[in-house]
Each structure stands twice: as C-alpha cells, then as structure tokens.
C-alpha cells in the first residue's frame, strides 16, 4: 500500500512540474512581441519573406502581404538595420555549420531591440516602406498548430515515462527508458517555445534553451541505443553505457563551445550516429535470442518501435536536411513521429500481441522496405541523371517491380508463408492417424501426438482437469492450451517449431479446427463402433445358440468318450472365438500363462520333450480377450512346430513382465530337421506373425549354435502395454 501511494505521489509530482514548465513556456510566448506573420529566410538574397499572414494581426493591419520580401528594418529613431536572412531561422535543423549558428545568433541579437520598439518600419526589396506596431502580448488563438502539437506529444511521452518510472520494476533498462522519455518529452516542450518564434529569439535565454534542447535530444537517442544493448539481455560486459555517455558529453561540449564540427551538419550527425549503432545492436540481439521465442518477440517489438520509427524520421526528415533539401516531414511532425516510440514501448510493456510479433515484424519490415526502395530509386534518378519527376517516378516503380518485389515475395514465403500451419496439408495424416481408433482415451492420446508433430512442439506442458471452451494462448504465446477430444480437461503444448517461435492467434484457430474435425471423426467412429458391436452381438448369439447348442448335444450323444473329448475341444475353441468376437472379457496374464504352461507340458511331454520354465513378473498385466486368445494360439502353434521339427530334449520356455507392463515370451529348442517350417518361414510363421501384429506386438526368431555345437532355434515375442 505504501509503495502504491508513493508511486501515485511521484506521478502527480512530476506532472505538476511539467505543468509549471508549460505555464512558464506560455508566459514567455504570450508576452513576446507579436507581428502575426511567418517569415522564411533567404540568406543568399539577404532578405526575409512572408509565407503566412494571420488575418487581423498587426502585420495584416499594417498592409503587409504574403510574398513580400524585406531587406531592411528601421526603428522610430531612424536607425536602420540591414537584414541578412538569418533572422528568420527558427531552429538548428536549418543550421549546417557553426558559422551559420554564429551568424544567426548575431542577427537575432541585432533585431531583438527593434522588435521591442512601439513602431518599426519594414522596407521591401523594391523600396516600399511599411510601418507596423508589434503587439506587446500575443492572443492565445494566434498560436500555431505546431505549438499545440509539440505540447501534446510532450504530454504523451511524459505520461508514459512517468508511468514506467512509478510502476515498473526498477532495472537498469527501465531507467534508460525513463531517461530517454524525459529527454524527448522535455525536448518537445522546448519546441513549444521555438515553434512560436516569428523572427528573433528570446534574447538572453535563447542560447541556453537551444543548448538544453540539444542535450535532451542526445539523451533521448543515445539512451535508447544503450537500452537496446541491455534489453532483453546485456550483450557483453563492455561498458557501452559509459561509452555512450562520454560520447554524448563530448558532442555537447563540442557544440556548446564549437571545438569540433561534424561534417555536413553538426546538429544532425550526433543524433544520426545512434541510428546505425541501433541497427547493429538489434541484429546482435536478434541472433542472441534465436532459441528464446518470448525474448525474440520482445526484440522484434523494440526494433519496430525504436529502429522502425526512427528510420522514418531519418529518411523523411534528417537525410533531406543533410543533402540541403527541404525536409519531407516538418520538424513538429518529425518530433510527433518519434513520440510513437514510447506509445509502442508502452504497448510492448503490456506484452500486447507479443505472440503475433514475428508476423507483424516481417510484414512491417517488408512494407517499409518497399516504400524505401521506390523513394531511393526516385531520388537517385532525379539527383544523378537529371530526370524530371514525371519520368523518374515510373522508372523507380519499374526498378522496384523488377528488383524488389520478386525478392520481397521470396522473403515473405521464407519467413512467413512457409511457417504457417495449413489445415489441408495435414488432413491425410489426420485421417490416417485416427483411422481405427476406439474410445476417447485413444483419441486423446493420438490427438496429442498429432498436434505435437504438426506444430513441431518442443515439449508437453501442464495437463489441466478443468474444461475449456477452445484453444487459447498462454505465457505470452510460448504455450498453446488445447481442450481434450473427450471434452474433459486440457493439455498444453510448449514451444512452437522446437522452441524457436511463439504460437499465434492463427495457431489457435488451426487448433480449434483440428479439435472440431477430430471430435466429428470420434463421433462417427463411435457410431460405427456401435453398429459393429451390435453385429458382433448378433453373430455371438447365433453361434452360441445354434452351433454351440448342437456341439453340446453331440457331447452327450457321442458314441465314445474319445469322440466326446474331441467335441468338447471344438466347443472350447468355439467359446474362445466367441470371446474374441464379443471382446468384452479380460483375463489376468498369470492365469493365461498357467493355461499356456499346462497345455505345453501336456503336449510336449507326451511327445518326448522336457519342459523348463522361467518366470519374472514385475508388475500385473490384464489381457484383453483378443490378446489372450492370440497369445494362447501363438504358443500352441510354436509348440506344434517344436513337436514337428524339434530335436527331442529340453525345451526352455520363459515369460516376464517389466515395470512398464511389457510382456516378453520366448521358446528355445534344438533343431532336429534342417527344413523346419519355422526356419523356412512357411505357413506357421506367417500365422504367428499375423496374430502378433493384430495385437500390436512384435516377434523375433533366431538360429544359433549352442556351446555343445548343436543348432539352436529361439523364438521371441513381445507385447507392450500400449503402442
């Protein structure tokens, strides 16, 4: 409770300070001399030009017009000032050297006393003189839209940053984000002052404000670079944060005291240095998180918000300025665009759609690259080959169509299309997987194995016993929870594509479709099973009542006891067959094993063989009717072949069940005849093989030489608990 109260107090305190700064900015702006005209600098012509005029303003009432060019200003005492053009420069984005900075500062300082006069005279290039009286205060309605735009973006960034500072877990990455946010938010607040300027600056505080703005811009850009270095994990132990701090301090000192001048544009290059660093660091973080899908999605989100949005500002604002072209994005909207970095980070902090990040990321990158290719091709054709715009744009589109779009399609198919799970591709495997499945437990087991393979899942997660309506994402897309086919409980798949990807909303839809399909197949299978069961019951009744009754009559009417025993044997075989057909009874393995032993002893000893038995039962095992009858008849067939082809002597028979319920049986005897049926793989072996496969077991036969030099035959079979 104390921590929560302290967090809200921090939010209120910082927003109160921000409100005081806004009030101070409005006080400076509204109490500055006001003409009501927006001027454009013409440094080559040493003049200024009106590009916009506010109706009803002092300039409008004095007779000034849009397009007027002024070369001189004169005060009421008759002192004339020749304009240089630098007076109309309103921001450092227009300054390409320290020399321009000094000239602008001197020009504004020279003009400031004139604007403070009650009346001053502007002289046009044609010699026309216009007398105007600047207002001592400025109407609130005359403030430019760019000023309110800067105020809005400052408020958005500061609110997000304060929220992170107050409520997020304290980490080094969090403090970097806060530093960057306050840098951008306060820089935008200073834009409220700069965007209100008409000609001169604010005299004695103008230079410190410009220096503060540059410092805040460096904090914003360089703190984000350090953040990428540390998030989601620190790349190395190299003190990258200290390095960036010293670099920023060097840049700021050089700009303030003009020690070192960056080429092309001394005020754009320092912030642009952060951009290629961010690109390289993003690639490194991408590779480091290749086996961590949640962290990789976070990296994707930060790259989209930080590098993606920054690249728009670089392409449409910074690069044209550095090439001495007007920016394609006005300064106020460039700053507003950068504000979306913190909106995106706020959404990322909430892990908004993090599980769909890999799809969003690639599509945005492809979209951005498409526009960038056309733009760069257009600029190249115009600047290097002197094409006009009407010719350059179609050629740029042709270049993009022939070079970029085929490459884009290949990238799209590799990174996006080929990774999607398409239901039609898995229908054949689905049908094959569930053909012949019986019961909800078997359907559930096969369904888990099927989805495990479809999504190339890394592992199975928690199994819940509460029901869910449909598939859903968990752990930010790292896991996918799916309802069981039986409708009772759910299970969890963890790590799509071996843990390299997150599950997406499309995967949820695919899983739900598979659930519906398999449930429909289960319903159809149950209906078919009921029909087969009813047919089995009819066959069992007919055989029991008709054939069984007749055989029982023969037992009592047999002319001899030997004939009666034969009929009783046939009747016993019929009962076993009915048990298999009905498939409703089960028998303990030890009871079945005792019956098989008794039968083997009786038959083998009557034929002159000696039986030796070995048993190792580690766990109980219950056989279905079909398993029982098949194992019994396999044992009978093996014993029959031993009697027919084996050498009189010991027959070793073994049976064991391990802790997992696996049944293993073996029969070993010396071969008496070279052409034995088992050795030559004739009808007896084929029948045995068919029976063991019918109950999902397997068999193995081996021929070897015993230590006594006799040829030895061994037959082994195994029956797992489930397969």
Image (tube, grey):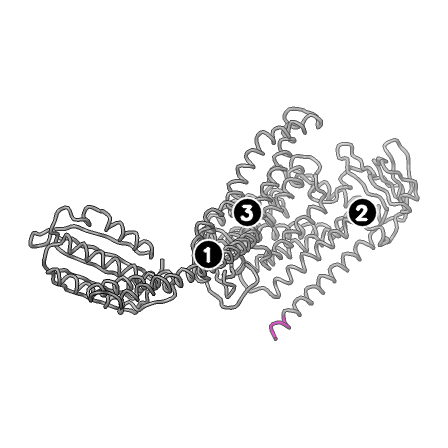
* Residue assigned mark 2: 112
Numbered mark located on residue 94 in the image: none
Q: Position of residue 270 (x, y in %)?
A: 60, 45
Q: Is residue 582 magenta?
A: no
Task: Calculate the distance from the C-alpha at mark 3 to the C-alpha at mark 2.
Answer: 42 Å
* Mark pair 1, 3: CA separation: 45 Å
Residue ID for mark 3: 278
- Most foreground residue, 193 or 306: 306
Q: Nearer the viewer, residue 123 or 354?
A: 354
Residue 427: x %, y % from top left: 49, 47
Residue in view at x 11 percent, y 63 percent: 610
Q: Do we see residue 231 in this rendering?
A: no
Q: Mark 3 or mark 2, which has the lower sequence index?
A: 2
**Crowd tier of the residue under label 1, counting other residues whose Cα lies within 10 Å: few below 14, some 14–19, many 20 or above:** many
The residue wearing badge 1 is 447
Q: Say which element carries label 2.
A: helix
Answer whether labels 1 and 3 touch (C-beta < 8 Å): no
Could you say which quadrant of the image residue 110 lies in? top right
Viewer-nearest of discs 1 and 3: 1
Mark 3 touching mark 2, by CB under 8 A? no
Q: Which residues are magenta?
A: 1-6
């Amino acid at each position: 409770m104390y921590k929560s109260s302290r967090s809200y107090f921090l939010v209120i305190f910082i927003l109160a300070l921000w409100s005081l700064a806004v009030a101070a900015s409005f006080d400076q702006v509204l109490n500055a001399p006001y003409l009501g005209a927006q001027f454009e600098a013409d440094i080559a012509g040493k003049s200024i030009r009106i590009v916009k005029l506010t109706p009803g303003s002092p300039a409008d009432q004095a007779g000034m017009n849009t397009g007027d060019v002024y070369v001189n200003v004169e005060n009421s005492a008759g002192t004339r000032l020749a304009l240089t053009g630098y007076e109309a420069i309103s921001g450092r984005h227009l300054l390409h050297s320290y020399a321009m900075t000094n000239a602008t500062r001197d020009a504004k300082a020279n003009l400031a006393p004139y604007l403070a006069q009650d009346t001053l005279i502007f002289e046009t290039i044609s010699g026309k003189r216009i007398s105007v009286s600047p207002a001592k205060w400025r109407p609130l309605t005359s403030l430019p839209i760019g000023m309110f735009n800067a105020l809005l973006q400052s408020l958005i960034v500061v609110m997000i940053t304060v929220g992170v500072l107050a409520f997020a877990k304290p980490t080094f990455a969090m403090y970097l984000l806060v530093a960057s946010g306050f840098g951008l938010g306060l820089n935008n607040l200073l834009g409220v002052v700069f965007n209100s300027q008409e000609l001169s600056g604010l005299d004695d505080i103008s230079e410190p404000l410009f220096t503060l703005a540059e410092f805040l811009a460096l904090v914003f850009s360089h703190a984000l670079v350090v953040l990428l270095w540390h998030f989601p994990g620190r790349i190395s132990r190299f003190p990258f944060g200290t390095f960036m701090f010293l670099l920023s301090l060097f840049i700021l000192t050089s700009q303030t005291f003009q020690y070192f001048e960056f080429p092309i544009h001394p005020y754009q290059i320092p912030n642009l240095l952060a951009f290629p660093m961010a690109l390289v660091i993003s690639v490194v973080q991408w590779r480091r998180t290749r086996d961590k899908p949640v962290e990789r999605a976070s990296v994707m989100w930060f790259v989209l918000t930080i590098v993606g949005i920054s690249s728009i500002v670089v392409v449409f604002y910074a690069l044209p300025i550095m090439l001495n072209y007007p920016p394609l994005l006005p300064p106020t909207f460039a700053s507003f665009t950068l504000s979306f970095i913190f909106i995106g980070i706020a959404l990322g902090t909430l892990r908004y759609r993090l599980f769909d990040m890999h799809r969003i990321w690639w599509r945005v990158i492809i979209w951005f690259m498409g526009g960038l290719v056309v733009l760069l091709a257009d600029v190249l054709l115009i600047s290097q080959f002197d094409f006009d715009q009407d010719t350059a744009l179609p050629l740029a589109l042709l270049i993009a169509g022939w070079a970029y779009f085929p490459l884009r399609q290949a990238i799209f198919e590799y990174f996006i299309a080929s990774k999607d799970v398409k239901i039609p591709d898995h229908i054949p495997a689905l049908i094959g997987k569930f053909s012949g499945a019986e019961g909800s437990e078997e359907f559930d087991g096969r369904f888990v194995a099927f989805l495990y393979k479809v999504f190339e899942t890394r592992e199975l997660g928690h199994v819940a016993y509460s029901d869910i309506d449909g598939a859903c994402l968990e752990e930010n897309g790292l896991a996918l929870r799916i309802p069981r086919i039986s409708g009772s409980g759910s299970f969890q798949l963890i790590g799509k594509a071996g843990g390299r990807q997150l599950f997406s909303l499309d995967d949820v839809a695919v899983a739900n479709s598979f659930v519906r399909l398999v449930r429909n197949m289960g319903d159809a299978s149950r209906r078919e099973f009921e029909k087969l069961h009813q047919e089995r019951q009819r066959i069992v009744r007919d055989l029991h009542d008709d054939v069984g009754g007749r055989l029982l009559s023969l037992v009592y009417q047999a002319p001899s006891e030997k004939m009666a025993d034969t009929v009783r044997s046939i009747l016993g075989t019929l009962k076993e067959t009915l048990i298999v057909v009905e498939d409703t009874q089960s028998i303990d393995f030890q009871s079945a094993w005792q019956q098989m032993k008794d039968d083997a002893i009786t038959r083998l000893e009557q034929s002159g063989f000696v039986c030796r038995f070995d048993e190792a039962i580690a766990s109980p095992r219950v056989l279905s009717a079909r398993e029982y009858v098949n194992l019994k008849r396999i044992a009978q067939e093996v014993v029959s072949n031993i009697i027919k082809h084996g050498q009189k002597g010991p027959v070793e028979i073994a049976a064991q069940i391990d802790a997992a319920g696996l049944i293993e049986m073996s029969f070993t005897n010396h071969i008496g005849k070279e052409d034995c049926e088992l050795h030559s793989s004739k009808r007896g072996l084929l029948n045995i093989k068919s029976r063991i496969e019918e109950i999902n077991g397997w068999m193995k036969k081996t021929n070897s030489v015993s230590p006594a030099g006799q040829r030895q035959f061994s037959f082994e079979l195994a029956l797992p608990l489930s397969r």
